[in-house]
Image (tube, helix red, strand yellow):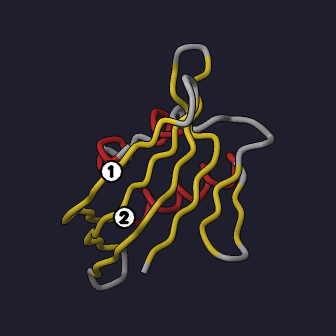
Amino acid sequence: MVKLTYEKDIDELMKLYENSADFKLISAPDEVLSYTQLYELYRTLFDQLEKQKIIESTTTVYPLSNNKALCVWAGQEEMKMEGMEAFQSTWISTILLEKQEGNWLIVHMHNSHK
């Protein structure tokens, strides 16, 4: 995910997500994005992103069954967006993964940034 974001490869990045009507990404208390809305968000981000550097991150995966897992990903990054000063942000993401046809896909995700 990080590598594809650095490369701004939106098509490969979106293959990590389940493209279904059930997919939900919660990015703010009152903001829930569909797969299509997430694609548009990434496209806007990649158009405006000048620099991104992960300063630190941790990833913990909790198996829930043979075909489901919960991933907790947290860290700190430095970003520079077009027309803005560089800034640092911390985040925590909870990611529900499901194995479908031999591939692990993100079926639900919650992000929180400061």
Left or right side of 66 for 61: left
Residue at left offset 52%, top offset 64%: 111
Q: Earlier in the sequence, mark 2 or mark 1?
A: 2
Helix, strand or loop at mark 1: strand
Q: Which residue is mark 1?
A: 59
Which residue of the protein is positioned furthest toward the left in this rendering? Answer: 55
Residue 55 location (% of width, % of height): 19, 65
- Give the number of the disc on residue 42: none
Q: Residue at x 64, y 35 (%)?
A: 18
What is the quadrant of the C terminus in the image?
Answer: bottom left
- Residue type at tag 1: Thr
Q: Quadrant of the N terminus?
A: top left
Task: Give the left or right position of residue 62, taking residue 51 as reference.
Answer: right
Q: x%, y% of residue 17?
A: 58, 38
The three-letter amino acid code for the residue at tag 2 is Leu
- Identity of the residue furthest to the bottom in this view: 85
Q: Which residue is nearer to you in this view: 87 or 50?
A: 87
Q: Which residue is mark 2?
A: 49
Nearer to the camera, 114 or 49: 114
* Secondary element at image label 2: strand
